[in-house]
Image: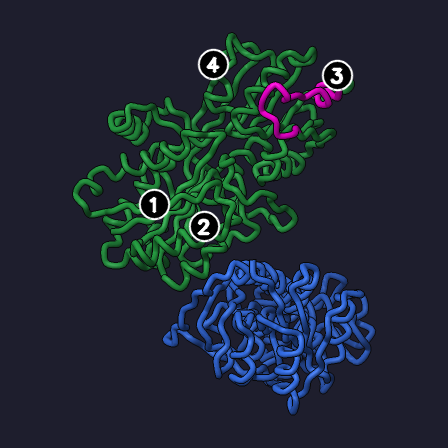
Chain colours: A green, B blue
Amino acid sequence: MNIGILYPRSKAHPGLLPDFMDGIKASLKQELSEGTMQLFSESIGFGAAEKEVYEKAEKLLVLENADILIAYIDMRVAPILAPLMHASGKLLIVVNAGANYPDNWIPQPGTIYLTLQHAFVSWLTGSLAGKMKNKNGVFATTFFDCGYLHSAAMIKEFTVTEGNIVFNYINKQAYDDQFEIKQLTDFLAANKDAENLLCAFDSLPASLFYKLLSESEQAGSLHLFATPMMLEPDALKDIGEGFPFSIDGHVPWIASQNNDGNKIFKEIYKDKTKRDASIFSLQGWETGLVLKQIFIDCKTYYTDGNKIADHLATIQIDGPRGEMKFDKETHYFFAPVHKCSLKNNAANLESEWINNIDDKWKAFTAIENSSNSAGWLNTYLCY
Amino acid sequence: MAEIKAILLCSTRFAIPALQEMAFFNQLAAIVVPSKNSAMIEQVQSVLNGITIPIVLVDRDNFEKKIIQAIQRYDINLGLMMTFSFRLPKSVYELPAKGFFNFHPSPLPVYRGADPIFQQIKNKEKTAGVTIHKLDENFDTGAIVLKEIIKIEPSDTYGILTSKLSHVAAKIARVLIKMISFDIDIPSKMQDESIASSFKKQSAGDIIINWKEMDATTIIALINACNPWNKGAVAKLNNKIIRLVEAEKVGGGSNEILIPGRIFSISNDGLFIATINNEAISVNIIYTDEGFLGTKQFNKIGLQAGNQFDIL
């Protein structure tokens, strides 16, 4: 089976490319060494140059005769590949962080999505924020982060549950000593009842945000509701003895998760690469698991994208995140998530694994999304 | 990036969102509308609202000549068709350098034909779609480039679904135009004839409620499929035509077996009519010679419990 891979790069997350690719290779170690699977790959930069994405995909399908195409691209870029995939009849697996979600969840033929469910878990976090007694919320984000629908998902659910956004703060994209949040802290100082901060930040700006927010005089009374990258180890690297504020959020995966699927993943990945597993290697590993399943179950039709998608609806994959299921109503994989809490002045993130996620996922995908649209074409985290 | 100078052939409002977007982005060089379709001509003029794009009016006798002239005169390089009344000959669809594409409001190869939106609702399909295909010598049979599928909600009327699909058409037109502007050879695939289906334009007989055979869900689907273009599905009561415009399924409300087509209750909550399988529908809006009538007006035209709709 020939696998074509459109891989991304990210200056903000230099580990994304090597971790993702090594995750796939570690997962498919046996198949690659036996020669039953072959990988062909092409770089697509940040994923925003649609012409390049198309041409590289075409090259993989036509010249390398890829049977299945993996594309680490945003949902908004995927349509450019639709005619090509339709004409070839092959399967397209779109891999990304899941920071965007579609306005039309009805699955399109031959395309499936394997994501980190960032918009979904942000939606869960919005719901959590909406349950607070104090219904006033402040939304804080960056110019980059607010261009993805994880922000909309969180705010939408917060407001549905009677929350009220009283101030929006959008930071310009300067992740160095120019990073500042003065307008936000001024507002918070003048509006002491605005205690809930709904935040959408990638890990680097999150670490800068935490640092500056910790220095603000009202920090001790603040309760942050965070998107998943804000709970990544990189974001929390300066936590020291703890932040004065508390943080709640959801993440798709935590490295210390104790299930067999995760232990196997971390062990093999470490053995092969001498590096610790990351969310990007997780994505690569899971991509490999899906490919293996297709290879085992769909031997006679692995060039038929529609048939494969039909088959995936009947299986579950036991992966690092637990039981990963394929939702035949949307063609998205979904998996258990973690609810995470960091109390004031505590350095340890507490987490609760939420295994039974089916109903929540169903509710999330039932939401009408016609009024929201995402701004950026580049894949979330690729910049 | 290649410049797009498109000609858009259209007869219905299915084309409007795409037309609007293309006009805004300066991608439209001419619009072709049948001359007898004054409503569409007015709508196009209103949408353009000062944007100067020539509107070419054609009829059955001159459309070939006039479209060829327009393609040549305005240096058109892309042809798009979105529900157009006339079949284009090869001499027209082979003319634009970047090709000629039809947008059909169904997930081809199913629901080929003149009015797939009506047929898809009437047939209680769960999904509908828009397909872009290359033009060939027949209607709706060309190689498929792209299609997008959406859900049909049980409450979707012909009008609502048309609006939804028109926005899908605009969305996938964006993808097509982007590919063409990138100078990409547009990939396409022949339609699978083994699963193809085709429907003729609905006739008078297709819009009549058959109380004897249709269950509640089928009647509601027909009502929705006829709203708004036919002002509802047709029923007859004492030789008076009554069009049912909006209705929902309700429980039969009685252990007694009711005769299909019988009004068993009438109130401000609706006109309750028995259907087969001891089900019922509640009708909220009707259309008669007296106009569109809501539940509070039903008694003014003499409707009452016990009335029996004619079995046509």
Q: Chain of mark 1?
A: A
Residue A41 image label: 1
Front residue of this view, candidates B136 and B67 = B67
**Label 1 SS:** strand
Q: What is the CA distance from the residue labelled 3 to the residue labelled 1? A: 52 Å
Front residue of this view, candidates A361 and B80 = B80
Between tags 2 and 4, which lies in front? Answer: 2
Q: Position of residue B164 (x, y in %)?
A: 62, 61
Q: Relative to B53, is B210 above or below?
A: below
Q: Chain of mark 3?
A: A
Q: Chain of mark 2?
A: A
Q: Chain of mark 4?
A: A
| Local crowd size for mark 1, using a 10 Å CA cut-off: few (<14), some (14–19), many (≥20) | many
Q: Is residue A105 left or right of residue B70?
A: left
Sequence-wise first label, 3 or 1: 1
Q: Is residue A105 visible?
A: yes
Is residue A177 part of the magenta span, yes or no?
Answer: yes
